[in-house]
């Protein structure tokens, strides 16, 4: 694993932690202190690390060139403690991807203002952080459980379709991995956005 791979791995770890903290912060704002009591509103990476999503899959992606995905341990949220569970769970779900997009924007603007010194320099770190957050933001908006985008479906799906949805939901990870590694759906979705990001940074 080279220096560039380590930078991407570090950027991913920071991005997924901030993604999860944002869920807990918004839930706390609406009255649910579950994440706070669980010690998850912290920048300490240890409580957030998920062995598969934070270590194994990112390392596999770095070493093999597979799609670069990852996640942290989901922040616990108790909808019953929210003042308006149906509406506010949507906000709690979507704040994670939008946090990633905000971080991407800041990193991309910073990278655009810098000159590259070659190799792993500050500009490279900013570019890597922008790319990682773009990938995470779009990845988590996919309408597949347990990703955050599934909260959109649960908010707007007709009530008569919900029983079928709850039957499909447990197979979300299987659907996700088939789509990612066999059908390459995420690669098709992310490519135009990645190219647009590159054009912006290098303009």
Image (tube, rainbow, N blue to C red):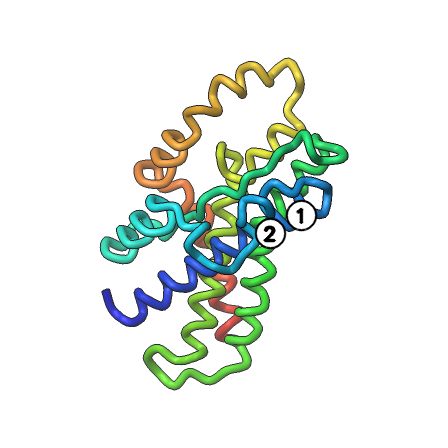
Q: Residue at horizontal 51%, vertical 60%?
A: 43
The residue at 40%/30% (across/down) is 175
In terms of image quadrants, where is residue 177?
Answer: top left
139 and 43: which is toward the camera? 43
Can you give x and y, in whole percent of width and height, for residue 138 in the image?
51, 48
Gap in Å between the C-alphas at discs 2 and 1? Answer: 6 Å
User: The N terminus appears in which quarter of the rendering?
Assistant: bottom left
**CB atoms of marks 2 and 1 within 8 Å:** yes
Image check: 23 left or right of 56? right
State the mark number for residue 56: none
Query: Residue 124, relative to residue 182: is it above or below?
Result: below
Image quadrant in which you'd find residue 3: bottom left
On residue 26, the disc is 1
Classify mark 1: helix, strand or loop.
Answer: helix
Q: Is residue 162 above or below residue 174?
A: above
172 with respect to 4 (left or right): right
In the image, residue 100 above or below residue 33: below
Can you give x and y, in whole percent of width and height, for residue 151 in the image?
Answer: 60, 34
Local packing at callout 2 (Cα closer than 10 Å; few below 14, some 14-19, many 20+) is many
Badge 1 crowding class, 10 Å Cα cut-off, few under 14, some 14 to 19, many 20 or more, is some
Give coordinates of residue 23: x percent, y percent.
60, 47
Instruction: Return the residue nearer the eye: 145 or 190.
Output: 145
**Residue 19 at what x, y percent from top left?**
54, 52
Residue most extreme to the front = 37
Residue drawn 39% across the image and 49% down it: 69
Q: Is residue 193 visible?
A: no
Instruction: Identify whether 152 is placed above or below 187.
Output: above
Relative horizontal placement of residue 180, taking residue 102 as reference (left or right): left
Q: What element carries label 2?
A: helix
Residue behind mark 2: 22
């Amino acid at each position: 694993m080279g220096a560039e791979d380590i930078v991407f791995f570090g950027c991913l770890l920071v991005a997924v932690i901030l993604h999860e903290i944002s869920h807990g912060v918004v839930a706390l704002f609406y009255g649910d202190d579950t994440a706070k009591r669980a010690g998850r509103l912290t920048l300490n990476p240890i409580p957030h690390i998920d062995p598969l999503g934070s270590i194994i899959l990112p390392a596999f992606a770095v070493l093999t060139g597979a799609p670069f995905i990852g996640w942290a341990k989901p922040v616990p949220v108790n909808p019953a403690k929210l003042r308006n569970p149906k509406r506010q769970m949507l906000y709690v779900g979507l704040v994670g991807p939008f946090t990633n997009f905000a971080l991407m924007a800041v990193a991309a603007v910073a990278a655009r203002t810098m000159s590259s010194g070659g190799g792993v320099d500050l500009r490279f770190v900013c570019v890597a952080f922008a790319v990682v957050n773009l990938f995470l933001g779009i990845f988590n908006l996919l309408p597949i459980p347990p990703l955050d985008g599934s909260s959109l479906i649960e908010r707007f799906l007709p009530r008569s379709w919900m029983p079928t949805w709850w039957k499909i939901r447990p197979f979300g990870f299987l659907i996700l991995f088939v789509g990612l590694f066999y059908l390459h759906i995420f690669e098709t979705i992310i490519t135009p956005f990645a190219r647009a990001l590159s054009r912006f940074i290098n303009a």
